[in-house]
Image (spheres, rainbow, N blue to C red):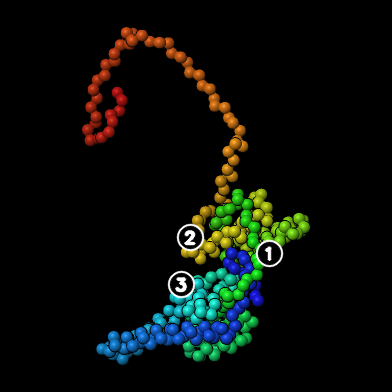
Amino acid sequence: MSDLVTGDAVVLGLRPARLPSRALAICLDVLVYGAGYLLVSIGIVFATASLDDAAQAAVSVGMFLLVLVGVPIAVETLTHGRSLGKLALGLRVVRDDGGPIRFRHALVRGAMGVVELLITFGSVACIASLVSSRGRRLGDVFAGTLVVRERVPGARVMPVPPPPPWLAGRFTGLDLSAVPDGLWLTIRQYLTRMNQLDPHTGAAMAAKLADEVVARTGTPPPAGVPAAAFLAAVVHERQSREAARAFRAAPPQAPYGAQAAPAPVPYGAMPAVPAPVVTAPVAPPVRPEAVAPARVSPVEPPRGRTGFAPPA
C-alpha cells in the first residue's frame, strides 16, 4: 500500500499497479485500437485507390499516428486516465501527487508509448516497470504520472479543518505552482493533528510551515493573520482550484490581499439608534386673495433639440 497525496491535499491509500495488471490492460487497449485501425485501413484503401504511391503512403502514416497515437491520448485526456483496458481492470493514471492528469501528461505518455510499446513491442516498458519501485514505465517517469489501482478500499482519512470564514476567498490570486507536493503533505498532516500538539510546539510548527509557503509564493500573508489560519486558507484555496479544474470551471479571480467584506452582524445584536427629530419652521398662513397670479410667457423649445425646455 502506498500513500498518495491528492491535489486537494488528501492522503489516499492506493496501491500502484504492477506489471501483470498493466500488461493485461495494455493488451486490451491494443486489441481495441488495432481493430479500429484495421477497419479504418480497409476504408482508406478503397478511398485512396486512385492516388499515387506517395499519397497513399502519406495517408497511411497520418492514419497510423491518428488512430494508434492520437486516439489513446484523447481517450486518456477526456477520461482523466481511464482507458478501456484500465477501466476493465480497475486502474487509473494519476499524477505523482494523486491528482487527475491533463493533456500534457497524456501527450508525453502517448509519445513515449510509441517507442516503448509499439516499436520495441513492449520490451522497454516491461524492463522499466520491473526496475521501478512503483511499476512505472518511461512514459510515466517523463510525464510525472503513476498508474494506481482504484478498487482498493482506502484507509480512514482525517479531514482537513476548514479556514476561518473571514479568510475564505482571500487567496484566489496567489500563485501556488512553486509549492512542492511534499510541503503540501506536511501542511495537511499538521492541520489534521494540530489539536493534539502542545500549543507552543504547534505554533512554532505553523510559523515555520507558513514561512516556507511564503518563501515559495513570494507574497507575504495579510497582517494579523495567524499562521495556522493562513495554512488552512491556502490549503482550502488549492482544493477549490483542483475541484474547479476537475469540473472544467474557472475559479473566480481576485487580486491577492483584497479586503474581505466584514462578517455580518446578527440581527438583534445591533444597537437601536433613535431617528433624529427634525423640526421645520411653520410658515404663517397666506390668504388666497393676497397672492397675485404670475404671468407666464410661453417658451418655445430650441430648434434642433428634443426634450423639456429649460425653466424661464
Task: Determine the residue positioned at 65% across, 51% down.
Answer: 225
Residue occupying the point 55% across, 88% down:
124
Q: CA distance from mark 3 to mark 2?
A: 18 Å
- Mark 3 or 2: the one toward you: 3
Identify whether 295 is placed above or below 186: above
Lower sequence index among marks 1 and 2: 1
Marks 1/3: CA–CA distance: 32 Å
Q: Where's the N terminus, which quadrant?
A: bottom right
Query: Which of the image's four quarters has the C terminus?
Result: top left
**In this rendering, position of residue 270 left or right of residue 73:** right
Secondary structure under badge 3?
Answer: helix
Report if residue 228 is visible in the image: yes
Q: Which residue is mark 1?
A: 189
| Left or right of residue 262, residue 80 in this image | left
Residue on which disc 3 sits: 78
Q: Is residue 16 left or right of residue 251?
A: right
Residue linked to disc 2: 250
